[in-house]
Amino acid sequence: MVTNDMSFLIGGDAGQGVESSGAGFAKALARGGLHIFAMQDYHSRIRGGHNFFQIRVNKRSVHSHTEAVHLVLALTEDTISKHTESLVPGGGIIYDAEVEVTEKELDEKDIRLFPVPLSKMAQEHGGAEVMRNTAALGAAAGVVEYEIDRIESVIRDNFRKKGEAVIENNLKVAGAAYRFAREHYAAEFEFKLKTVDAPARMVINGNHAFALGAAVSGCKFVAGYPMTPGTSVLIWMATHGKRLGIVTKHTEDEIAAICMAIGAGHAGVRAMVPTSGGGFALMAEALGLAGMTETPVVIFEAQRPGPSTGFATRTEQGDLLFMLHASQGEFPRIVLSPCTVEQCYQAGVRAFNFAEKYQCPVIVLSDNYLANSLRTLDHDQFDFNQVAIDRGAFLTDEDMENLSDAYKRYAFTESGISPRAIAGHPKAVYSTTSDEHDEYGHITEDAGNRVKMMDKRMRKLEEAARDMQPPELYGPHRADVTFICWGSTYGPLREAVDILNEDGDRANLLTIMDMWPFPKDSVGQRIDASKRVIIVEGNYAGQLAELIRMCTGREIEERILRFDGRPFSPEYILQRLKEGE
Amino acid sequence: MVTNDMSFLIGGDAGQGVESSGAGFAKALARGGLHIFAMQDYHSRIRGGHNFFQIRVNKRSVHSHTEAVHLVLALTEDTISKHTESLVPGGGIIYDAEVEVTEKELDEKDIRLFPVPLSKMAQEHGGAEVMRNTAALGAAAGVVEYEIDRIESVIRDNFRKKGEAVIENNLKVAGAAYRFAREHYAAEFEFKLKTVDAPARMVINGNHAFALGAAVSGCKFVAGYPMTPGTSVLIWMATHGKRLGIVTKHTEDEIAAICMAIGAGHAGVRAMVPTSGGGFALMAEALGLAGMTETPVVIFEAQRPGPSTGFATRTEQGDLLFMLHASQGEFPRIVLSPCTVEQCYQAGVRAFNFAEKYQCPVIVLSDNYLANSLRTLDHDQFDFNQVAIDRGAFLTDEDMENLSDAYKRYAFTESGISPRAIAGHPKAVYSTTSDEHDEYGHITEDAGNRVKMMDKRMRKLEEAARDMQPPELYGPHRADVTFICWGSTYGPLREAVDILNEDGDRANLLTIMDMWPFPKDSVGQRIDASKRVIIVEGNYAGQLAELIRMCTGREIEERILRFDGRPFSPEYILQRLKEGE
Amino acid sequence: MSEMKDFLSPVRPTWCPGCGNHGIWNALKMALADLDLSPHEVLLVSGIGCGSKLPDYTRANGYQSLHGRTVPVATGAKLANHALTVIAVHGDGDGYGMGMGHFVHAARRNIDLVDIHQDNQIYGLTKGQYSPTSDHGFLSKTSPEGAIETAVRPLATALAAGATFVSRGFALDPKHLSRVIQKAIQHKGYALVDILQPCVTFNKVNTYDWYKERVYKVEDEDDYDPTNRERAFRIACEWGDRIPTGVVYQVEGVPSYEDQIPALEAGPLVKQPLQRSMEEYEALKEEFV
Amino acid sequence: MSEMKDFLSPVRPTWCPGCGNHGIWNALKMALADLDLSPHEVLLVSGIGCGSKLPDYTRANGYQSLHGRTVPVATGAKLANHALTVIAVHGDGDGYGMGMGHFVHAARRNIDLVDIHQDNQIYGLTKGQYSPTSDHGFLSKTSPEGAIETAVRPLATALAAGATFVSRGFALDPKHLSRVIQKAIQHKGYALVDILQPCVTFNKVNTYDWYKERVYKVEDEDDYDPTNRERAFRIACEWGDRIPTGVVYQVEGVPSYEDQIPALEAGPLVKQPLQRSMEEYEALKEEFV
Ligand SMILES: Cc1ncc(C[n+]2csc(CCOP(=O)(O)OP(=O)(O)O)c2C)c(N)n1
Ligand SMILES: Cc1ncc(C[n+]2csc(CCOP(=O)(O)OP(=O)(O)O)c2C)c(N)n1
Ligand code: SF4
Ligand code: SF4
Ligand SMILES: [Mg+2]
Ligand SMILES: [Mg+2]
């Protein structure tokens, strides 16, 4: 018997509630003190099309999904045919008893079939077929002998708004399916889940973690245009705007979004725009406006596969070099590329501090896998008391009151950072412009001033470089292979490294989380100190490898790249590693 | 006496006709068989502000302006104070006799003052003060003892539309000033111009050369939004549209411009958009659309200093890395970066062939200095009979007639290039999309298809790489210093190399004209074979140096960079070289 | 004679069962068949959104472009080959939100396009945010306290821009809609077709019934006069208890944009020879001498 | 009392002598002084163009943004600090060309902005291309055979969009213009001020005299009624022999956008504390459990 180490997969058509059932189940597991990692796979359409939601559950914290699945909840026949492949020997499939299944392939793989009269139970015990998913969840809990009360508590919370009757009916359905499954199938199934004694953890994805960080960091203005997978940040902010005093604006387009954020940033409010690559493309011009006028603004970009519309609901890491070079001309920018849900939260907090401290645009670069995958986190992993607001050289009313000379918005300073006043004080009235300007902000075409202003602006990156977190080394200090990665690839790669190291110090992993200013010295040294370096990235060109060569001259020839829209998994990485050998 | 080797500078306020006078004078010199290089320097405002136009004239073909000036035509006092510095010993200043000039500094430098009653002559002989510029030109010709009839012929052409009376009056003014200056000052001035026996050459800038190349190459659709310094391509096309059967559209914005061009390209017409960096920034999203749908489109981008509005009328090479990475996701693009007026013409011809052959966006990257500077070229430097149209795998009506199966727009082929049908034939009806699609053009989220499609698209660059012109080596094969440059920097740098090599093989110059796919092997080899490498670029970051390191791993530490909005000159480069030693 | 089924692509629609797009799709095929157009004579340009997938499901030349950029792509294609019947088809977010600028400029340009908006007053494909045509107070994921803006009035906006054909249809009345689309296709110049399109999944306010109770046909009114602009403006502003459908405004005889371009007098650009004679180009050099 | 000279910046205008922008600049300073506003209470947001340089020449908070993006930048600033009087000031190319989408959306949003368009029917700073308001047939560098489009009718477009204040002024009549601007500033909500602005250098058609012969003041008409939208639409479409100036339409009492945002009830965002109490954030975690 294997306890607390398995993966579920719920599959069905778009519109069948695969995601909401999955998320509910994930919460029920977290409420039992277990750790989960959950990812979803869905098409860019509202109905039909095969979707699935996969939950890995474990006693320890886990960083990615795995290919191997132990229990499939099939809401459609398609689910069975598509996912049998992933089932481990001894794995099982729960499906509606009405469906006919050809058992041949299943037999060969030693797979258990758990037909449950889901629709019938939904109708009999709940009075409506929509409760089929509830039945399926009950059945799943039954087969793995998990405590039904955790499922019940989630049902209560999820249906709270729909009233007692709905709750009651769902509880009945879940209970009936639970009993049925436990009675008929639990004995045949060797994978089990047991609540453990641990505080209930948050079940949260990268986007929500980022939003939370941004909110705590004093972000007060969010302008955006919906674009998967950036949308959920906008929606979370809109939902909580009233409560938290945050203004959100669903704008007419992404250009308006970033321009509004820049206007708000200029006026002194912490502002941001959540988007995806295509929306960011429309912001390229205004990015330079923020650069030139030294306006703080945060851009959150969750990548999806391009080019162009590409795969709207899938994952990729194909925008890295675009982010670093977007917009005409040259100006300082900071790019953070969080790798975990925790780091998304941290990036939310840090981005606004950096934007104000360095008076420049800060890009937080995430991706669909990180944006949408759920993980369990302890409450104290978001320690709000640690959040320190740093507005940099920001003039208070008192400071302005004490200004004796005409205010120089762009005073030449050693650090390149000029003390910033915002509009509204009689002693610091100034005008600025996207044209090259002098210290006061007035247009000038003087060549000498130009050189000084360019130097001043770019100089800000020197101090910023010192604020960047160096790349993290995971695993033994010395190893046969050093992997390098960024972003969400960290999770599966870390798990792959753990597997490799089960017998010896075979691998370690260098992860770049703060991407620009680029940590060239530490990356270069680590490469030089490594026996064998392999880059692992979710794109075609090996963009981080290219960037590393650009910044350090080091060539990384071995590359494990994936660009089919699907996330890495530990198994996939190990398989590719093997193929390469 | 120095004959046929000098520089003029005409200076005045915006709105005083500095540029038109200068361009007229340049033509008059070209009509005397002389070579010229002329550049302009003006502010982003319509009136006032000091502007100047500088003409270098020589018996041989010249590739840049020089800092040294021999004769200044001052329409304002400002011109005198601003440009005395540049005058060589023995140089002179023609100015209106009414202006008072403090002669101290001039004396020290051995500079001749040539006051001419310009306004008075304009009024007396022409009847209107506006002819002051004509008087100035006449006077200039007089001082250098150039043949007045060349000036007269240009006056005749320029004022043709205004009628005989205007022509006559201008001729009278020019003649009077010519005689006056020749009589009073020619003897004191040692720099002379003499017509030589040579066919009259074209006086043309990079933008017009590009437009001409595009027109000859069958470009039929130009959509653009005015943006300095890209505008003159749009205007030239608009002016000649009726005559050449070209549709031009001044659109509502740059997004519409590129989308219209993509629509036209998709419908089978050679189409392009001229713009500058800021306008290009707005096109980033649609660039990926062309990449994904494999639509031919040509983007002409003339750089100006950024970030943002920056210096609207000045020069820089700050957009290179942006051009290479613009738009989300990954797709093939071709980037040409012509270095001379001739190459601008060639790029016009080649870009459209490449766009259709490789069914991808082609970017032609120029800059303000190249866009606006005039050079003399022999007619046969644009040899239209050499122009070969290559539409690539373009299905003719007959080909389509013979299609037996349903047409696959994106058929998988070895080269990655799929035979292209355009809309309108009953046998090749298809639909395409910016989403990932199958061979027919239908949306699919299949992972296997995705990988094949990405590979197919990117594979096109392999053949394209073979179509790229390798970097050019100018100067001796072996030298103490190898300079590397791109774009308009070529001209002044080539002249600097010539000066360095006056006594020995001191320098050579590697110029990258076809930028992407990047010629990594030849650049790498050349760097390895060089004793000392210096990059010379008009930007802050040394973007080509960064690109070279990205593509070859080679570090180029010595960099001569300029980013004050002013173009390089041979003297400037030599000076910086000296300072660096 | 062409038939509706000639316009069937091998790909089946993936719209939700009951989605108004099914009706629009049928009405469009009906209009094309009734006008006896063949698939290769038609170019459908769309953007990104649920409705914008229509070209994938339709046998005709098709181009699904970018969200919000349907109209400029269609314009470019039309200018390159004005022998094609070019039909833009996109959502309200696409056309009236992101694409608002292009919409107004296309209307005043009077380029010969049919501009179909699948107006479901919501963002469908991104799962339910309010759209530019959502009514004031509309609750959605991005307007949890209710939309603050006044909804776009597409017909009035087109009129103000100088559009020569302004109409509306209802997805539930495909016959009438098909006639409106036919007229739009036959109209020479820019033709707006705003289509009330219930989104059964995300818009629970503007449902089939909601529309059905309100729509009326302008041509059924006694004093119907589609040539009177002021009157049309009044009708175009109607929204609430009564929602007008049909051809609200049409003025004929205004030359379309492409008819006024000298370079197009010789026929569609794509049919013109790629190059002129070398002498013509050679002569251009003289300008620079 | 503030005075016109309080609004003088150390930088002198570089507009051509005789340019209509001088008159607009004076009228604006006059309006601000007459309303007794101080430089620090005002934020001028502009785009890129000749007229957009106005903030550089004016002592007030200023932000010259991007060509075409004046309105969203101004909107963001207003939402961040609605205690400021935010005035957008930009050219016709900026506002009605590139910025058309933002214009319509701002109007229907009824955000409390004064939106001044320096409408010279030409692109000035880029040296003479036709603009969205250039008349049909207008000859320019990009329309050498004459502009084909119908000109934008800014007032009609704003009306169709649902604007609550629609007006026009004339640069040659700074007193009247100043009064119009004052009313626009006092209006709560979006206020369009279209200003006829002769460009003496590049527009040789729409000259001072051309305008002078045509302009009239709507308030001088016997049946003046700025609250009647249909009537306003008719006036807004007038262009030719008679060109209306003055406040063409105004409806008061419609709540402005920023007044309807719950988060702004506590006062301007920029004045609110940066963070809430940690307990409030802590409670958010419970949503994820
Ligand atoms: C530049 C850009 N921003 C955002 C998106 C994401 N997106 C896709 S469809 C859509 C909205 C769809 O609404 P609508 O246009 O009304 O079409 P519907 O789905 O309702 O038919 C959005 C915002 C995108 N594809 N491109
Ligand atoms: C994105 C972008 N495209 C083009 C330009 C170039 N540009 C600067 S000003 C201008 C037009 C100015 O016309 P208008 O807005 O009417 O202002 P005016 O100069 O007439 O006051 C243009 C096209 C730009 N700055 N940015
Ligand atoms: S989500 Fe709405 S618009 Fe989209 S297919 Fe479903 S019903 Fe139609
Ligand atoms: S070009 Fe025209 S708009 Fe610009 S400053 Fe001169 S007159 Fe004014
Ligand atoms: Mg919609
Ligand atoms: Mg203008």
Image (cartoon, coloured by chain):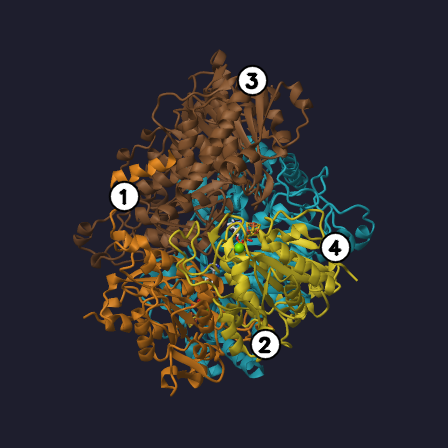
Chain colours: A cyan, B brown, C orange, D yellow
Location of residue C288 with respect to D217 vertically, above or below: above
Dot 4 amino acid type: Lys
The residue wearing badge 2 is: D226
Of tags 2 and 3, the one toward the viewer is: 3
Q: Residue at x 59, y 19 (%)?
A: B578
Residue D158: x and y in percent read 53, 69
Q: Find the distance from the CA under tag 1 to the CA under tag 4.
A: 64 Å
Q: Compare residues C79 and C176 and report the one nearer the observer.
A: C79
Kindly identify which chain the residue marked by label 4 belongs to.
Answer: D
Q: What residue is pinned by disc 4?
A: D5
Chain letter behind tag 3: B
Front in this rendered view, residue D131 or D203: D203
- Tell whether C208 sits left or right of A291: left
Apparent side of residue A108 relative to residue B565 in the rendered image (left or right): left
The Cα–Cα distance between marks 1 and 3, rounded to whole angstroms, is 61 Å
Give me the C-alpha separation between circle 4 and circle 3.
Answer: 53 Å
Report the chain holding disc 1.
B
Q: Would you name the residue on which mark 1 appears?
A: B391
Disc number lying in front (1 or 3): 3
* Disc nearest the viewer among 1 and 4: 4
Say whether residue B531 is visible.
Answer: no
